[in-house]
């Protein structure tokens, strides 16, 4: 790597540290950047182990919202060996979770339980099975319930974002981490499955939209407000559907480059099922929505 190339990686990392600090403070920035760094280094280490030509991570700063769009590494050539593909795809999410889960537990322990305050532009973070179980383990009860929930501090919020980012990356389509893992397991047959799963994203978004509209109407919102509420909660599903379509178009009309026909080793087949279970545990139907009374 040239000095100029190394400087670009360092500069983007420093800029993303700054934007996440601006977005949520030093604890938020340190927590989120630790999770993202672990995730990307997991990919890099696995790629080096399999002699895959991969770059160091490019962090993406964002001067608003969460302060970052995450990070990516660049594969200079497609990964053809299925064992290597599943290792590289799974290593990032697994490494990120090894950092995110302990930090989330620590953050939840520091976060009080209090009344859910509706209105004033307040938002409620989405629940996954894993997140619910961690709140139960730390707080001793299923939350939210009876009008109260955990009031996340900066560390807990950043770690929750880490879980959400991992869930998004594990969607088993295209060249997302989950797409790599699924393609390694199913081979070329997954190209057809990916097309159906892609269409399913829009279906899930439509169901989420409908349920949120009904929920808002039940809370006394007008039809206009209820439709806006539903659209806000379902928006991520539309964004993911569009982005995956763009990624497919940029890849020449295929979701994933072809791999060899050598079957996966037994340990890698077990790794696939581990990742599949994690995807289900992290599945978050409504990532973020306005808090209703």
Image (spheres, rainbow, N blue to C red):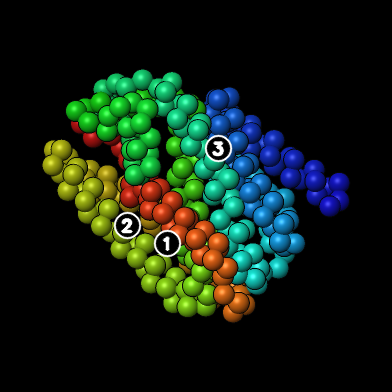
How far across and how far down the image is residue 38, in percent?
Answer: 62, 42
Q: Position of residue 235 (x, y in %)?
A: 37, 51
- Residue 170 picture location, percent across and down: 48, 55
- Label 2: few (<14), some (14–19) or many (≥20) C-alpha neighbours in 10 Å: many
Give yes or no for contact between labels 1 and 2 (Cβ–Cβ under 8 Å). yes
Question: Counting residues from the N terminus, which is met first, the one under dot 1 or under dot 2?
Answer: 2
Q: Along the horizontal axis of the image, is 64 left or right of 44?
A: left
Q: Which residue is mark 3?
A: 99
| Relative to 77, 68 lies left or right | left
Answer above or below: position of 115 versus 33: above
**Is 278 situated left or right of 16 in this image?**
left
Name which residue lies at 46% across and 32% down: 104
Q: Secondary structure beneath disc 2? A: helix
CA distance separating discs 1 and 3: 28 Å
Q: Position of residue 121 (x, y in %)?
A: 33, 31
Query: Nearer the viewer's eye, disc 3 or disc 2?
Result: 3
Give the number of the disc on residue 241: 1
Above or below, 5 against 293 in this view is below
Choose the circle earlier in sequence order: 1 or 3: 3
Task: Give the CA separation, mark 1 to mark 2.
Answer: 9 Å
């Amino acid at each position: 790597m040239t000095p100029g190339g190394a400087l670009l990686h360092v500069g983007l990392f420093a800029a993303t540290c700054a934007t996440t600090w601006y977005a949520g403070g030093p604890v938020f920035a340190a927590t989120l950047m630790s999770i993202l760094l672990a995730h990307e280094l997991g990919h890099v280490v696995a790629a080096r182990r399999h002699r895959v030509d991969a770059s160091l991570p490019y962090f993406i700063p964002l001067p608003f919202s969460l302060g970052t769009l995450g990070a990516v590494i660049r594969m200079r050539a497609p990964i053809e060996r299925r064992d290597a593909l599943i290792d590289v795809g799974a290593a990032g999410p697994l490494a990120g979770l090894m950092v995110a889960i302990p930090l989330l537990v620590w953050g939840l322990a520091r976060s009080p339980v209090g009344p859910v305050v509706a209105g004033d532009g307040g938002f409620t973070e989405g629940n996954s099975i894993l997140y619910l179980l961690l709140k139960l383990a730390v707080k001793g009860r299923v939350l939210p319930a009876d009008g109260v929930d955990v009031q996340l501090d900066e560390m807990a919020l950043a770690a929750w974002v880490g879980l959400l980012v991992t869930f998004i990356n594990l969607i088993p389509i295209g060249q997302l981490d989950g797409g790599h893992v699924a393609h390694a397991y199913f081979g070329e047959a997954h190209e057809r499955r990916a097309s159906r799963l892609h269409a399913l994203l829009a279906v899930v978004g439509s169901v989420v939209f409908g349920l949120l509209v009904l929920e808002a109407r039940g809370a006394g919102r007008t039809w206009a407000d209820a439709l806006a509420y539903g659209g806000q909660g379902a928006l991520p599903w539309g964004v993911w559907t569009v982005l995956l379509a763009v990624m497919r178009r940029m890849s020449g009309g295929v979701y994933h480059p072809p791999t060899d026909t050598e079957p996966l080793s037994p340990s890698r087949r077990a790794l696939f099922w581990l990742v599949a279970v994690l995807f289900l545990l992290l599945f978050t139907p409504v990532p973020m929505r306005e808090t209703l009374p």
